[in-house]
Image (cartoon, grey):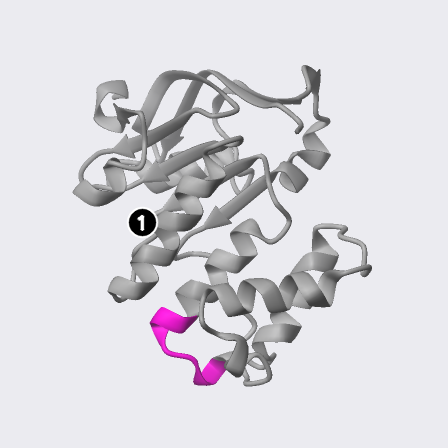
């Protein structure tokens, strides 16, 4: 099993002269989990976007290492999984086509990919919908598909931003089972204010402490 580590050093983000957070440092290794807390609009999602490479910080650095070897910045995305409300799906493609396309972006080999896709579709109870276009999916079904996107490439680091969004109790149970399984050997980061989500993690940081 490969070890994974992420080190954030003095991260700061400013929008239009407003400090979202500043001088935030964090070090996480395989088996670590942390929840990011803060009121709505405080910067939780902004931090997740920076950690996952969607946007950049104004100051500071992020280093991801695998087996104590730094991962080149342009390859960090291959070590990361993300489930979030701002992840876009292709509505005109089927569930299967969305997943196959995504796996291609992650440079996954085609060998065994159909079996892997079917395994995860079964896990989230969407196998029977695999050939339906996503535009016909409910918001909860789309959130389940986003969960597959996050874990199908077996990332070392899993970021969850409000993971229970639009899910019923069965869907939330699937998210929690996935998170518990991942954090045994990987890194789990959850941005949330939900009390049950917070219980997934061994410790918490409040983004408002970095204003």
Stretch in magenta = 135-141
Q: Which residue is rendered at x = 40% and y = 64% of the image?
A: 143
Residue 59 at what x, y percent from top left?
48, 20
Question: Could you say which quadrant of the image residue 102 lies in?
Answer: bottom right
Residue 35 at what x, y percent from top left?
31, 32
Q: Is 164 displayed left or right of 12 in the figure?
A: left
Question: Which residue is tagged 1?
Answer: 162
Q: Secondary structure at mark 1?
A: loop
| Total numbered circles | 1
Residue 51 among those drawn in magenta: no
Residue 136 among those drawn in magenta: yes
Q: Is 134 displayed left or right of 116 in the figure?
A: left
Q: Main secondary structure of the magenta part?
A: helix
Location of residue 46 with respect to 10 vertically, above or below:
below
Residue 23 at what x, y percent from top left?
37, 14
Q: Which residue is rendered at x = 35% and y = 70% of the image?
A: 140
Q: Is 137 displayed left or right of 54 in the figure?
A: left
Is residue 104 visible to the viewer in this orientation of the structure?
Answer: yes
Q: Is 165 displayed left or right of 102 in the figure?
A: left
Q: Nearer the viewer, residue 144 or 106?
A: 144
Q: Nearer the viewer, residue 144 or 61?
A: 144
């Amino acid at each position: 099993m490969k070890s994974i580590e992420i080190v954030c050093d003095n991260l700061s983000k400013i929008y239009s002269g407003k400090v979202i957070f500043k001088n935030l440092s964090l070090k996480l290794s395989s088996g670590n989990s942390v929840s990011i807390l803060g009121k709505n609009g405080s910067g939780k999602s902004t931090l997740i976007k920076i950690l996952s490479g969607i946007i950049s910080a104004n100051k500071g650095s992020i280093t991801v290492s695998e087996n104590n070897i730094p991962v080149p910045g342009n390859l960090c995305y291959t070590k990361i999984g993300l489930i979030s409300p701002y992840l876009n799906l292709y509505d005109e493609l089927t569930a299967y086509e969305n997943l196959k396309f995504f796996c291609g972006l992650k440079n996954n080999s085609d060998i065994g990919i159909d079996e892997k896709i079917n395994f995860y579709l079964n896990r989230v109870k969407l196998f029977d919908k695999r050939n339906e276009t996503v535009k016909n999916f409910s918001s909860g079904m789309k959130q389940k598909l986003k969960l597959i996107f996050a874990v199908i490439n077996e990332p070392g680091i899993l970021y969850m931003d409000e993971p229970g969004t639009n899910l019923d109790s069965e869907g939330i149970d699937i998210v929690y089972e996935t998170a518990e399984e991942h954090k045994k050997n990987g890194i789990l980061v959850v941005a949330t204010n939900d009390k049950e989500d917070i219980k997934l993690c061994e410790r918490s940081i409040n983004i408002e402490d970095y204003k």
